[in-house]
Amino acid sequence: MARTQTDPVRIGLVGLGWFGRLHRQVWDSCPGAEVVAICDVDAAAARGEGESAQDAFHTTAGTGGAARSVQDIPAFSDITQMLQACEIDLVDIATPEALHAGHAQTALTAGKPVIIEKPFTTSGADARELARMAQAADLPVCVGNILRFDPRYMHVMAQFKALGQKPQHLSLQRHFQRSALAVYGRVDPFYGACIHDIDLAIWSQGARPTRALGHISRHQQSGEVIAATGMLEWASGHTAVIQNAWIMPAATPAGFAFESTFLARDQALTVRSQPVVEQIGAARSDWPEFFFWPEIGGDIDGALRRELTHYLDCARDRKPSDRLPLDEAVWGIETADALVRSAMTGHWQDVGV
Ligand SMILES: NC(=O)c1ccc[n+]([C@@H]2O[C@H](COP(=O)([O-])OP(=O)(O)OC[C@H]3O[C@@H](n4cnc5c(N)ncnc54)[C@H](O)[C@@H]3O)[C@@H](O)[C@H]2O)c1
């Protein structure tokens, strides 16, 4: 029987690690969504019993990321087998960064709309190829650049739009505890953490930067990343400076700190990580994060929920997102590529070559 607009969108979730489990929790409480298949190479993760290092360094409101049993849902260790065995309307990819492009290509080849966690891909060539495939197949490819759905940044962009201006300079800082590097250091920081701020900068300008200068500082003995720093420039002369360090103390509230300033003539807007609720205990004080993926009343809320419900609509209507046009996600990866090349050569690099 033909499916109708009111039938739930049947989701195949690929990658049931720390963030895939949060996606799962959003879908569980999202009207019109149904996770019908899961796929993970780790059998414990596929059963919903995975344990993640991330639980120790992310403090979020509620219990966010808690494992839930998925034993009632067919589980696979291979995305192709999952797509062959199950009727799926949307593939949601939350696997490690370097696997996104391959998993998305498999899903698009099978004729499925996809959601891909950030970073979209780890090379501009892969990003462009996915955009080409999406256009050829007329399928939405939705990228998890979550700050597009954070009300604080939505407010900033709306203010500039109302003024008819673009920020002339952006100062974007986002810092994490060293323990987070054990997981997210598996990818170059310009694709990992910096992609959030690269995307903010592209969102604010509505254009691809023309050139980029990148630098990565490393620990002298271990070679571990201390900080990634990038500078972007647009044809308009507007600029952005992006800073991302991995040496915040373990007691950092919420596990990370950020400050993003958007400057134009007679206009300066700053978003920073600040407490919504202060939680002071005998041994430690903290503040749980309330904007990204807080668990409120048992459901995952915040920007992640706003993002996934928007992308659910895109998949149902088979329409690309107007909140994050795919071209802009491609520009983000091309910008990260240029920053990586620049950090290797010590010179400015053109973006998108
Ligand atoms: N939007 C955000 O702010 C945000 C926050 C955290 C993570 N993420 C992104 O989410 C993605 C997942 O991150 P995570 O923290 O959950 O990592 P993770 O390592 O905890 O989870 C990845 C999962 O993928 C599984 N996997 C590995 N290879 C696979 C394969 N071939 N097929 C199926 N499953 C496979 C692993 O077994 C693991 O369970 C990453 O791209 C990360 O950057 C985004």
Image (spheres, rainbow, N blue to C red):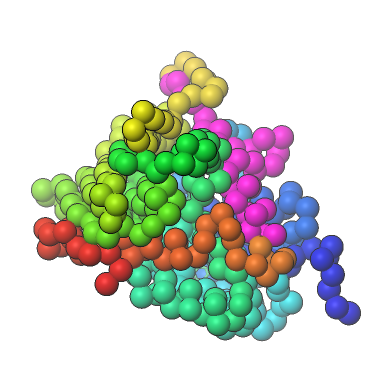
Please indicate whether residue 317 sits to the left or right of residue 271 in the image: right
Tell me which corner region of the image, top left, top right, bottom left or bottom right, holds residue 139.
bottom right
Residue 106 percent location from the top left of the image = 54, 80
Depicted 276 relative to depicted 324: above or below: above
In the image, residue 194 lies at what x, y percent? 34, 50
- Range covered by the magenta-colored residues: 284-313
Q: For residue 318, which quarter of the picture?
A: bottom right
Position in image of residue 327 (x %, y %): 46, 66
| 269 up-or-down from 214: above or below | above
Q: Quadrant of residue 179?
A: top left
Identify which residue is drawn at 23% across, 57% down. 212
Q: Residue furthest right?
A: 1
168 with respect to 275 (left or right): left
Of the pair 28 and 239, the residue shown nearer to us: 239
In the rendered view, tell whether residue 150 sits above or below residue 329: above
Q: Nearer the viewer, residue 126 or 10?
A: 126
Give how far across and how far down residue 229 sits, in percent.
23, 47
